[in-house]
Amino acid sequence: MEHGLAPSGRWRGEARGAVVIFRGIPYARAERFGAPEPVAAHDGVYEATRRYAIAPQLPGRLEGVMGRADALQQSEDCLALTVTTPVGAEPGSCPVLVWLHGGAYLAGSGQWNLYDADRLVRETGVVVVSVSYRLGVLGYLRAPGLCAGNLGLRDQIAALRWVREHIAEFGGDPERVTVAGQSAGAQSVVALLGIAEARRLFAQAIVQSAPFGVGFQSHRRAERVGAMFLAELDADPRTAPVSDLLAAQGRTVRRMAGPAALNAAPPFLPVADAGPLPDEHAWRQAVRDAATAVPVLLGCTAEESRAFYGGPHPVFGRLRRLPVTGARLDAAVQHLIGRKAFERGLFRFADELADAGARVYCFRVGRLHPANPYGACHCIDLPLLFADGDAWHTAAMLAPLTAAEIDALGRRTRGYWGEFVRTGRIDDTGWTPHRSGSRTVGQLP
């Protein structure tokens, strides 16, 4: 391993060609069901060369589609981030992209090798910060007398605060921070756009496949899910082993999905009107009030629902096997689901932002290979940004593409993302800023 020091000299990472990676940097600590607290400053040089433990979780529901990340230890001590920066970056010189992973608020981690940003940083010259936050019941349980919810959202704000205070030491400019996320991470970005204490910590936003059709959780539904979980646990959640929490969480998720697993909405997610997230009216007003100052890049994939229903499925599998009309019916129903869960809300949000004076760019990601049954499914945008080497080799949604072909397909997307992070614009005459009512998008890859 070749070591590399941050420009400040206080952090030692791993040098890999034109980039240096600083892994496993704790940005906060938290007791179970407690708010995140800042970590004490370290003395000397911090060894940031190993991946940190990830949030306790069960295998993700899309693991069979997007592939499996390298196994890492799980722990409630999981509030850490990874910084990837260009070699030789001067303190405060580079724009910053802060990445919030997806996973239905149940799975994923900023420590995953699937989100390694070496190639993205090499090609764009930006600093990338990948964030881990608490998941499932440990991050989003709402139960009166125990937890108000939104702890994972509080973790994300704590990470942004750490970036504001420390990123200059790694070559990043704290005044040029873009917060970006996909799926649950994208919905988190949408939430952060209307939270005053968060808005001071970033200048731009990228929203990839946010489940606008799901929206934020109401108090009533969140408490119903919380009560269901507590009944499944049948023990004190403050002291129960993590394994018991996860088992009860898994049973709750299956009950909420229904007997045919048709309900793909996350049962644990941000709750409206529960600090720091305002009620929907106040949140929407805060988004509009800040719109002129926050350029936004947002979009979705062309066939989002194929990730959830395109593989083996008790209902859609039978539908596809119907003679003559099965395939067409399957495609039509999945298209409707995708529009309702993702695309309609996306354009509604883009229209609201544009009406309020924001500079907005919309995109849609199409198929990467015509023979792949998952098509342009949810998560197909991720390897366009992060694929490097064979990290994504187990992703069924990418077959039969080679690593070199995936790299070539993603080069244009990485260029656009880098340009937006640097300038807040897309300098392409064929991809103009969104106008309210328009449904014209930039087509990727």
Image (cartoon, helix red, strand yellow):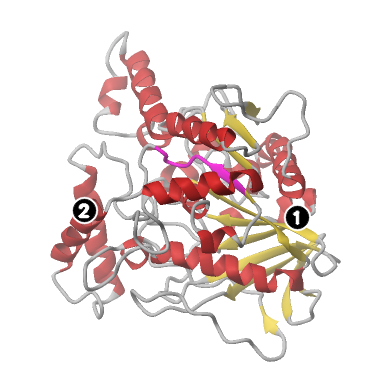
Q: Which of the pair 371/327 is nearer the observer?
A: 327
> Judging from the image, what secondary structure is the residue with disc 1 in?
loop
The image quadrant where one finds the N terminus is bottom right
Q: Relative to 193, does residue 363 appear above or below in the rendering? A: above
- Residue 410 falls in image quadrant: top right
Q: Which of the pair 164/376 is nearer the observer?
A: 164
Please name the residue shown 44% across and 62% down the image.
153
Residue 117 seen in render = yes
Q: Position of residue 353 (x, y in %)?
A: 55, 38
Q: Which residue bears the numbered disc 1?
A: 126
For the residue marked with disc 1, what is the amino acid? Val
Q: Position of residue 234 (x, y in %)?
A: 13, 70
> Judging from the image, what secondary structure is the residue with disc 2 in?
helix
Magenta residue check for 208: yes
Residue 168's label in the rendered image is none
Q: Position of residue 276 (x, y in %)?
A: 42, 63
Marks 1 and 2 sit apart, C-alpha to C-alpha, by 42 Å
The magenta segment is 205-212
Please name the residue shown 24% across and 44% down the image.
257
Residue at the limit of the structure toward the top, as seen here: 324
Classed neighbour count for the residue bearing mark 2: other residues with Cα under 10 Å, few (<14), some (14–19), many (≥20): few
Q: Which of the pair 389/239 is nearer the observer?
A: 239
The image quadrant where one finds the C terminus is top right
- Residue 43 falls in image quadrant: bottom right
Residue 1 seen in render = no
Q: Which residue bears the numbered disc 2?
A: 220
